[in-house]
Structures are given as structure tokens and as C-alpha cells.
């Protein structure tokens, strides 16, 4: 009788194990977000119990005001007017022509009385101290958290995503989801307490610089003078800050270059222009925590 009972419990345990091990169904053919454009993913910050860049294993050279929080996928990093500065992320040097940057963030869109901008990710230029009054990097994924007052009249509820590129000719090129060509899909509203994904892409052949928010294309100016852009290769990046926030670099702190107040997760840099389908899949998979 004892032998029969033991066999029963072993069989039950095996049955339960098989049930738990059933894989989740793919989303758009992908099992997880790391499978999207996997060969082109050159830098990735997961913040799942580590601040290291996942591909190179590179640890931050400076950390200010950072702690862990529940992210969109596992953990994320919470920044209390802080940033993380990295050097030696070798994968960034492959971003020579086409690129895509994807990141999730949770931010209050209520900065008042200050002409400031929050930097989610900056790909730092080579030798930034050579231009000590220029806080911009090669690639800047920037949020304006005080720009647009909408409804209700007493609060700011429309987030402006305003990425910029510093081109080799010295010009600062941009795209944005504000200004005249407003539609319902251009607005990123009611951001308090919500995780939002933004992707920016550059296509060197077409000279198109696009912005995406939560899987939807939102930029109004994809062709605003960006034809000469080529990144000045470096291995440095700032998450949550501007290069002027980083101490000991030699770039003058400017009033608008505010360190991040909020949370950031799943920062990814690709050396290709992600397709519409890839961006949509990445959004859906990461939103599902995979």
C-alpha cells in the first residue's frame, strides 16, 4: 500500500511539473523580447538586479540617486534626480549608420516653472570636453515634462518626446510629437504612474528620423534636416542624465539639463532601423513582461 501511495505522489508531481513547464504561446512569432532583431542588439540594460550593461557586462563608472523598482519587465531603475554613466560599452561603436534606441520610462509630466528636459538615454560623443558648453550627445532620447498644458487646465498631461541628433557638421537635428500636426496618436497623455515605451530610429539611406510611443509612430518631423548625421563613435552613454550632469567630464552644467526623476527600464540600442513590425512586437512582448 505504501509503495502504491508513493508512486501516486510521484506521478502527481510529474504531472504538475509538466503543466508548469508548458511554454507561453509566442507573440508575433517571438518567445521573448530578446529575440527581436537579436543579431543587431548591441547594448542592453535590463536593470534586473544589476546596473551592468548586459552584453558587455560593463558596470557604470558613476551612479547618482539610483535604486531598484518593479519595472515593465522584471526590475527597473528608479532615479531620484539621478543618472548612470557608462564608459567602455564597445557595442555602441557599431552604431555608425542606421540605429534604433528603445526604452521604457515612468515619469511625472508635471515639471512647472522650470525650462528643463529629462534625458532617458544619451549616446555620448567622443571627447565631450572638447565642446564644454554643449550638453548634447550623438543621440539624445529626451522628454520635455513641462512643455504642454492640456486638460485638466491645472496640470500637464501631454508628454513631449523630443529626441535629437548631433550631426558631424555641428548641427542639432530633431523630431518631436508636438507643434502643428497634432492627431490623437501624436499625444502621449496621462503619464502619471504609467510605463511608456519610446523608440527612436534613424535610416541613413532615407534620412528619416522617427519617434514611436507605445508601438505607434508619433513624430511630426521625420525629415527635418538630418541628412548629414553620422555618430562620432564612442563607448560612453548616460542613462537618466546629460553629459553635463556627470562630474569630472568638463562639460558645463546648464539649467535645462536636469537629471532624471522617475524610473527607466529595458534600454536597448540596435545598429539597424527597426521595422514597424519589429517595433510593434517589441512593445507587445515587453508589455507582457517577456
Image: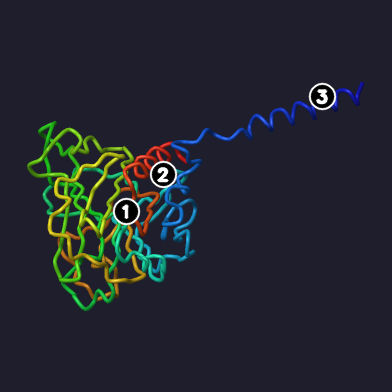
Q: Is residue 187 above or below residue 141?
A: above
Q: CA distance from mark 1 to mark 2?
A: 25 Å
Give yes or no for contact between labels 3 and 1 (Cβ–Cβ under 8 Å).
Answer: no
Looking at the image, residue 45 sits to the left or right of residue 147; the answer is: right
- Discs 2, 3 touching: Cβ within 8 Å: no
Q: In the rendered view, would you say 121 is above or below 247?
A: above
160 or 207, which is in the foreground?
207
Q: Sequence-wise, which precedes: disc 3 or disc 1?
A: 3
- Considering the numbered disc 1 on the image, is that residue within a helix, a strand or a loop? loop
Q: Which residue is mark 2?
A: 71
Per the image, the residue denoted by label 1 is 273
Label 3: how many residues lie within 10 Å, few (<14), some (14-19) or many (20+)?
few
Residue at the image position 21 percent from the left and 78 percent from the top: 130
Mark 2: secondary structure: loop
- Residue at the spot 88% in from the left edge and 23% down from the top edge: 4
Residue placed under numbered mark 3 in the picture: 8
Amino acid at each position: 500500500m505504501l509503495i502504491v501511495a508513493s508512486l501516486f505522489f510521484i506521478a502527481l508531481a510529474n504531472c504538475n511539473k509538466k503543466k508548469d513547464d508548458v511554454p507561453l504561446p509566442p507573440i508575433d512569432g517571438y518567445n521573448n523580447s530578446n529575440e527581436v532583431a537579436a543579431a543587431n542588439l548591441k547594448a542592453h540594460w535590463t536593470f534586473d538586479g544589476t546596473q551592468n550593461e548586459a552584453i558587455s557586462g560593463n558596470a557604470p563608472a558613476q551612479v547618482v540617486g539610483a535604486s531598484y523598482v518593479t519595472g515593465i519587465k522584471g526590475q527597473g531603475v528608479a532615479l531620484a534626480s539621478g543618472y548612470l554613466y557608462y564608459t567602455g560599452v564597445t557595442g555602441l561603436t557599431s552604431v555608425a549608420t542606421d540605429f534604433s534606441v528603445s526604452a521604457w520610462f515612468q515619469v511625472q509630466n508635471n515639471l512647472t516653472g522650470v525650462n528643463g528636459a529629462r534625458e532617458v538615454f544619451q549616446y555620448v560623443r567622443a571627447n565631450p570636453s572638447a565642446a564644454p558648453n554643449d550638453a548634447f550627445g550623438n543621440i539624445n532620447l529626451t522628454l520635455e515634462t513641462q512643455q504642454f498644458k492640456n486638460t485638466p487646465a491645472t496640470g500637464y498631461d501631454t508628454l513631449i518626446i523630443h529626441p535629437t541628433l548631433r550631426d558631424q557638421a555641428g548641427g542639432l537635428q530633431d523630431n518631436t510629437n508636438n507643434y502643428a500636426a497634432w492627431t490623437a496618436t501624436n499625444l502621449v497623455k496621462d503619464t502619471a504612474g504609467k510605463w511608456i515605451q519610446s523608440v527612436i530610429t534613424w535610416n541613413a539611406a532615407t534620412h528619416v528620423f522617427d519617434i514611436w510611443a507605445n508601438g505607434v509612430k508619433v513624430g511630426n518631423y521625420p525629415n527635418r534636416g538630418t541628412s548629414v548625421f553620422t555618430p562620432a563613435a564612442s563607448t560612453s552613454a548616460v542613462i537618466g542624465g546629460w553629459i553635463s550632469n556627470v562630474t569630472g567630464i568638463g562639460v558645463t552644467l546648464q539649467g535645462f539639463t536636469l537629471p532624471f526623476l522617475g524610473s527607466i527600464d529595458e534600454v536597448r540600442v540596435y545598429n539597424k532601423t527597426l521595422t514597424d513590425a519589429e517595433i510593434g512586437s517589441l512593445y507587445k512582448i515587453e508589455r507582457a513582461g517577456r
